[in-house]
Image (spheres, grey):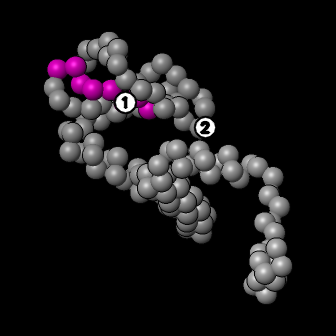
Amino acid sequence: MTARPLPRVGSWFLDVRGEGRGVRVSRHPERPLVNLTLWRQDVCVGSTHLAPGDVAGLVAALSEQLADLVPDELSTRAGAARVEALERRLTELEEQSRTPGWRRALARVTARRAPRRPAPSPRPVEEQVRLTLVG
């Protein structure tokens, strides 16, 4: 058996147990395959060559397993909060697109001003008539 040099492009994933264990993912240098190699220290102890379709299946299986690690309640609560935040942001953006920029700026300026005193109430009609006749 002939040992080949490691391809320059690849990714390492270390085992949480340590002891130099890990998995390396790289593409096959001569064929359209992906190599998965198992390592202990600096020794390759196993390898698998996967066709692109099988890699897609592996990625799907890993995603499913990862999703199963998250408690449903936690993922549902976090997902609902995220959806709510995105809906609020979308509403804000929709409002901005309907209101011209100058009007939004004017609204911000007028909102900062101190409230004005109410205008005096108009005089009753009887008083206005009396002033007209007397004056």
Of all residues, the one furthest to the left in this rendering is 31
Q: How many residues crowd mark 1 within 10 Å: few (<14), some (14–19), many (20+)? A: some
Main SS type for the magenta part?
strand
Q: Residue at x 27, y 42 (%)?
A: 55
Q: How many residues crowd mark 2 within 10 Å: few (<14), some (14–19), many (20+)? A: few
Image mark count: 2
Q: Residue at x 80, y 58 (%)?
A: 116
Residue 55 appears in view = yes
The stretch drawn in magenta includes residue 24: yes
Q: CA distance from mark 2 to mark 1?
A: 19 Å
Quadrant of res 119 = bottom right
Identify the element where label 2 is drawn: loop
- Of the pair 29 and 81, the residue shown nearer to us: 81
Identify the element where label 1 is drawn: strand
Q: x, y percentage for residue 18?
A: 60, 32
Residue 38, labelled with which disc?
none
Residue 17, labelled with which disc?
2
Residue 93 appears in view = no
Q: Residue at x 76, y 49 (%)?
A: 113
- Looking at the image, residue 80 lies above or below residue 107: below
Give the foreground label among 2 and 1. 1
Residue hosting label 1: 25
- Looking at the image, residue 95 lies above or below residue 100: below
Q: Which region of the structure is painted magenta?
A: 23-30
Kind of residue sitting beneath label 1: Val
